[in-house]
Every structure is written in C-alpha cells, then in structure tokens.
Image: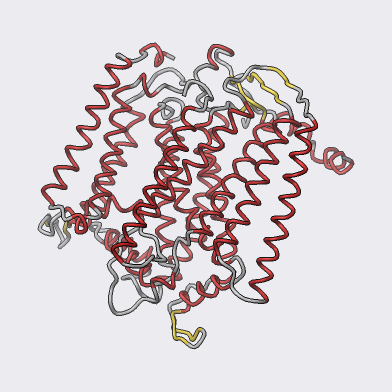
Amino acid sequence: MYRNDTVLPFFAILFSIALFYAFRLDAIHLEQLAGEAKEELTPGQIGLLAFSAVFLVYGLIGYFSTWLEGVELRPGRHVPEPGAAVAVVSVLLAVVLAGLSGFFVRLLLHQMTVGPVSSAAQGVVFGSIMLVAALLLAIYKKYYLGDEVLIEDEHSEVPW
Amino acid sequence: MSVYKWLDERLDLSRLNKKFMRKAFPVHHSFFLGEITLFAFIALVLTGLFLTFNYEPSTRIIKYQGTELPAAYASVLYIDSLPFGKVIRSVHHWSAHIMIAAAFLHLLRILVTGAYKKPREINWYIGLGLLGLAVVTAFTGYSLPYDAYAVTATQIGYGIGASIPYVGQWVSQVMFGGEFPTLRSLPRLYSIHVVWLPLTLLALIGLHMLIMIKQKHTQPRYAEKIAPGKILGVPMMPMQASVMGLLFLLYLGVLFILGGVFIAHPIEAYGPPGASTPAVKPDWYFLWIYGILQMIPNSWVIPLPWGQEINPEFIGGVLIPGILGLAAVLLPLLDARKTKMRYLELPSHHPLRTSVTVGILFFFFVGTLAGWKQELGLSNAVLWTMLILIPLASAAVTYMLMRSIYGKGDQTETAG
C-alpha cells in the first residue's frame, strides 16, 4: 500500500490460481459423485470463479500499472524512444488481431449458415481479440505515448 | 484536426481539456478494484441492451419448436440460439457476479486503508448503497430466465422480503407484484431490473465519481515525501485514460473467455418450472444469509402486536445483515478524525481494524459454509459454535500476530 509495487498483484494472481484450482477440485469431486460431468455450475463454483476472475484482472493490471507507470511517480515528462523491435512486435500483434477478428466473423457466419458453434470457441476467440488489443494499447502507452507526472493543488477548481 | 478546430471554436474544447482533462490522478494498483466494478457495470449495460431486444418478460405459455413453454423461458432459449447469443447472456451473468465480487473487494480496500474517514464519509455511504443495490439488481435478474432454478431461488428471496414485519407484504407487492410467482411478477421484476435499478445505480455511480474527483484519491504514502499536501498524479488525458482503456480491454478479455468456456446459467440443464421444486441454493453472495437461515430453528418466533411476528427468515435474512450494515454505517462516526485524510493508511499500522476485518471475513466464510449444512452433516450447535468462535479467534490471532510483528502501529499516521 506504500507504493505502486507488484507485491499485492503477485499474491492476487496466486490467489486467483488457487481459487481456480479449488473450483476444478470441486468440479472433479461433483463429477465423481454424479458419475457424469454436469453442465451447470453450483453457486459455490460460480463464486470461486468470480473471485478468481477479479483477482486475475486485478493482478494483471497491477503488473501493467507498475510496468507502465512505475513504482513511484516523479514529476516531469519522459519522452519515449521506441526501437525497431517494438515496431516489429506491434505489427505482429496487429496481424494476430486482424487474423483473430476474421476468424471470429467466420465463426458467427458458420453458426448462421451451417449450425451451432461451441460457445467456448466463440468466447475464447473474442476474449483473445480483447487481450491482444490490450497488449497493443500497453505497448503504445509504454513506447509511443510517453509519461507525464503532475503536481496539482489540492483545492483545484475541478469539478467545482 | 480541422474538425477539432471547428468544434473548439464553438465549444471551447481547449478550455475543457485544460480544466478537466489535465486533472491529476494518483497511481496505485488498489484503485483499480473500483474501476473493475465500474467496467463490470458497463459490460452489464452493454450486454443487457442486447438481451432486451429478444427477451419477453411473460409467463404465458407459448409453443416454441413444438414444445409448450413459458414465453420468458422460450425467449432465453431463442437468445441462446443466436450467433454469439449464448456467450453474451453468459457474459451478462458473469459480469454481475464479478461486479459484486469487485465491489466487495473495493469496499474491503477502503476499509483496511481507512479511506472512509474525513472527508470521504459521504462516498463511503454511497459505496455501501451501491454494493447493496448491485446485489438487489442481481437478485431481480434471478427470475428472468424463468427456469426451475430461477423460480425456486427467487422464492427464497421473496420469503425473506415478505418476512419483514408490517411492511413485508407491501415490499413484496412492489417488488414481485404479489405472491411470487404471479402473472405480474416477471413484468414487475423486469422493469425494476432493466430500468429503475440500473438508472439508480448510474446516478449513484456518477455521484460517487464526482465526489471522488472533488475530494481526490487517498494517495500512496510515498507521495507525501515528494509533494506534501499536493496531489501527485498522471493527467487524465491521455495517461490515465490509456490505462483505464487497457483495464477495460483486459477485463473484457478475461470476461469473454470465462463466459464462453463456463456458461453461467445453462437454462436447458434446469428446465422450465414444473410441479416439483428442485433443491437449489441461492447465488454465492446470498449463501452466508442462506447458511444462517439454515441454522435458525423454526421455533425462533417473537410475536408482535397486530398479528405480526419476527420469524426466522426475518432474523437471518434481514436482522443479521442489517446489524452488519449498521456497523458499516457507524464506522466513519466511530473511527473518525478531525483533520483531512490525504494518504492511504497501512493495514499493518492499524492492527485492531485489520483484525476485525479478518474476523468479519471469517464470519462470512463460516456463514457460507453453513449453506452446505445438510451435505456436511453438521448440527446447528456445531455451526453456531463455529460462527461465533472462528471469527473471534481469527480476529484475536490476527491482532496478536500484527502486534508482535508491527508493534502498536504508526500513531503519527493518523495525525493528519
């Protein structure tokens, strides 16, 4: 809590993995009891996965925040100097993004014309598009946008 | 650029940029818990808009693909058959769970860092209201698929609402259109779920953020050394906005993968409501209340004047959560300070508050565990002992450990 370090995000990701593992163990246990895999999730499993997701997103953004904004802010401007490697990675990610988007449209068209497509495939492809876009935005922020840290008076006129 | 210039000449955008978009935002990862809650709400609104196009809030029986089904149930089956429809419905469901989980963790962060103290008491109260409203909004969405699970789970909530002495029947009339399920229940719950509660949430979220912008964040403590008494942060545009955009994309990525792989509420698995009532438990955020209800014997009835009574449903579903809510309301008054609070308090420097928080978490945990009373084969006596002793013991052990590791805590921290 003292500074924007990665201690809590690290434990958040660890906790997220532990909660997901608890969910898997519960699912395996219920499967053994019922003799078959159930399609529906129990309220307990939904709770475990919901907290696992929150801790995962929190852990990830915590690491990104430390990477992009630093452990401690220092007033001033920092002009970035993107190298050729960054440009190559950005182009590759953009190609992956375009490919995934095209594949996602294909999935939808397939469901409309041929028949059902697995929800998991649709969710994973769309989710991956968002994650690749997130990576591209992070690279843009880190290597192209630069940094600026301000010191503002406590009694600013915003919003009144 | 010329478009910007055209707009700038008419709307004075550069002044807006200078005044609002340059506002400094302090940086700390724990602030993102509030933003995750906000983005969960945005995802709920966006996916909810899609669902409203095809959902029919009616219990009338129609023929859907040769089978007679309630119209609401059939319309959800239709949504599931649309391209990406099942994923969007699942994502809507998951986002509600994640919003409540994130709001709860956000509230915990505020609690353990003392961010409810002067001048942020009002925002603490608004935050409590938002968490409560988020839970009620999620609850009103329970019944909408109108499957066997939805109807039974809503009936548990209906029972709790109707148990409030004197006003219970009135509350259930307003919320459920009579004794649930009636013909009027679904339209009533639908209207509350998609119009009234989201609008109230939107207004409160707006107010919450407006006050936060006015009062500023509680900053990480190191900022005191660099810019004492000032706000050290990154400008709203483009720095803070780009990180917020990144978080939104990360959230959507995780949410859609989760929603696609694990369909949160597969209504075919539950089937339409029938004559037999399936044995279901309410959602996880109600499980601790449900668990406490399991522990209260039916004999706990206190008669009141005019034929009313305090019954076990009221004690477990309203009174005990109400006492916890009252404690949260009183907190900023009991743990107050005279000077303005500018910096995050370290949980390690406040062993009493931190250990009481740990105790409350264990209370929720044991209450939730009691929801599996039958499966675990635990008696009421054992569960009551656990519900009282485990939170007390965990709080006491945490307090002793913190005192032995950190000492009395930094008393100068609270001096302003």
Q: Position of residue A79 (x, y in %)?
A: 76, 23
Question: Left or right: B177 with respect to B31?
Answer: left
Question: Left or right: A15 with respect to A57?
Answer: left
Return the residue nearer the eye: A47 or A119.
Answer: A119
Quadrant where the image shows the N terminus of chain B: top right
Return the residue nearer the eye: B80 or B19.
Answer: B80
Q: Position of residue B331 (x, y in %)?
A: 33, 31
**Residue A116 in the image: above or below residue A101:** below
The quarter of the displayed image where residue B38 is located: top right
Question: Left or right: A90 with respect to B95?
Answer: right
Return the residue nearer the eye: B228 or B35.
Answer: B35
Residue displayed at 31% across by 66% down = A34
Residue displayed at 48% across by 72% down = B57
Residue displayed at 39% across by 49% down = A48
Q: Position of residue B391 (x, y in %)?
A: 23, 36
The quarter of the displayed image where residue B408 is located: top left
